[in-house]
Image (tube, helix red, strand yellow):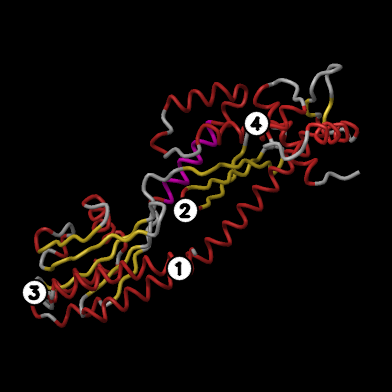
């Protein structure tokens, strides 16, 4: 006899309920758990089959059932398979999306520079105050764990860690449940000492593993926030304006436009100044020293779920502000329409 979809659903319900309550589970409880899709008689028959197959046991006469080791094993394998499939699907989706996004942003930067005759930049979207969606621990071998961290926007990071003691599949499952039930939806700033202490206490003998996992999760989120792609175009347009074509000024400005770490200061300032909308920096108002003789007009675009990036136009103080502002508004609308359509 094989486990069909109904038996699997009932087995999962028994295991989840037992894990939550620690009490044997009866057919009436399962009926409520599965939203009464089947009658109590049907559920009792299926539970009898599951017991006969060795997935559940009845600890006492007339009592409900609890999972057997075989039941737990099936549940763990199912969980790992489902999460592996989910992570694979998310990875494939994000590779396609981010590849498409990079092409779009490069093309938009080029068009922006061409249409305005100024220098243009577009930063790739970033998450600030990333929230955890889920953490998956999987055993690679006796002393190594794979940690899959998924944050908002389905950004995925994989890290491998060594552990001091061997951990069983059931213990890993319990750690996954513990971590996800306590951390899902939190930002790294919200995972404070109180949260960490509670997790380590609940993890018991595996408190060191929890500590190790939390350190890795914090590291991968911080690394993701530090990664910034900035696409520039039209840098040589500055030579069209005599007030910017002085060899020293032009050299400094070109050098700035070629180095992501220098442009990061501008992007960070824009993010701090405004959640969305357009900002205009004239002369000394510019946050970047090499742009003090320029005007810099920036806008923040959003792609949903808090995913934001910066668009910037750098030109002389006598730039055509009306044209630049109109161009930026149209570009934000275009980005919004492009990715809403893609998501739909």
* Residue at mark 4: 174
Question: Mark 1 or mark 2, which has the lower sequence index?
Answer: 2
Mark 3, residue position: 318
Question: Mark 1 or mark 3, which is nearer the start of the sequence?
Answer: 3
Q: Residues within 10 Å of mark 3 (few under 14, many from 20)?
A: few
Q: Was residue 96 drawn as part of the magenta stretch in this picture?
A: no
302 relative to 7, above or below: below
Label 2 neighbour load within 10 Å: few <14, some 14-19, many 20+: some
Disc 3 from disc 2: Cα separation: 40 Å
- Tell me the mark number nearer the camera, choosing from 2 and 4: 2
Residue at x 55%, y 33% (from the top left corner): 181
Work out how far the residue at label 1 is from the one at label 2, CA to CA, in angstroms. 17 Å
Quadrant containing the N terminus in the rendered view:
top right
In this figure, which residue is indicated by the disc labeled 2? 153
Question: Which mark is in front, 1 or 2?
Answer: 1
User: Viewed as shown, does residue 205 lie left or right of 75?
Assistant: left
* Element on which disc 2 rests: helix
Of pointers 4 and 3, the one earlier in the residue sequence = 4
Which of pointers 3 and 1 indicates the residue nearer the eye? 1
Tell me the magenta residue range: 211-224
Q: Which residue is mark 1?
A: 341
The image's mark for residue 97 is none
User: In the image, residue 293 lies at what x, y percent?
Assistant: 10, 67
């Amino acid at each position: 006899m094989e486990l069909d979809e109904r038996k699997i659903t009932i087995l999962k319900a028994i295991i989840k309920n037992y894990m939550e309550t620690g009490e044997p589970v009866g057919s009436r409880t399962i009926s409520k758990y599965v939203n009464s899709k089947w009658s109590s008689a049907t559920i009792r028959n299926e539970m009898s089959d599951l017991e006969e197959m060795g997935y559940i046991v009845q600890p006492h006469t007339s009592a409900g059932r609890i999972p057997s080791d075989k039941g737990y094993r099936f549940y763990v394998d199912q969980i790992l398979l489902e999460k592996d499939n989910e992570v694979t699907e998310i990875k494939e989706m994000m590779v396609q999306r981010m590849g498409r996004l990079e092409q779009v942003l490069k093309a938009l930067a080029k068009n922006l520079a061409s249409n305005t005759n100024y220098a243009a930049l577009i930063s790739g979207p970033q998450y600030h105050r990333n929230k955890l969606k889920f953490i998956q621990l999987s055993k690679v071998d006796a002393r190594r764990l794979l940690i899959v961290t998924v944050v908002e926007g389905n950004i995925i990071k994989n890290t491998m860690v060594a552990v001091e003691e061997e951990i069983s599949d059931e213990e890993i499952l319990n750690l996954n449940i513990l971590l996800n039930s306590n951390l899902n939806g939190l930002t790294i700033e919200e995972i404070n000492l109180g949260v960490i202490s509670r997790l380590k206490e609940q993890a018991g003998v595996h408190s060191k593993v929890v500590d190790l996992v939390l350190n890795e999760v914090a590291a991968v989120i911080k690394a993701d926030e530090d990664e910034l792609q900035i696409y520039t175009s039209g840098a040589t347009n500055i030579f069209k304006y005599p007030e910017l074509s002085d060899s020293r000024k032009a050299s400094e400005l070109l050098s700035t436009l070629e180095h992501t770490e220098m442009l990061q200061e501008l992007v960070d300032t824009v993010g701090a100044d405004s959640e969305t909308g357009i900002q205009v920096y004239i002369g000394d108002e510019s946050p970047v020293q090499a742009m003090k003789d320029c005007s810099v007009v920036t806008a923040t675009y959003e792609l949903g779920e808090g995913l934001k990036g910066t668009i910037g136009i750098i030109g002389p103080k006598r730039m055509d502000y009306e044209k630049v502002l109109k161009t930026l508004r149209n570009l934000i609308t275009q980005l919004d329409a492009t990715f809403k359509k893609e998501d739909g």
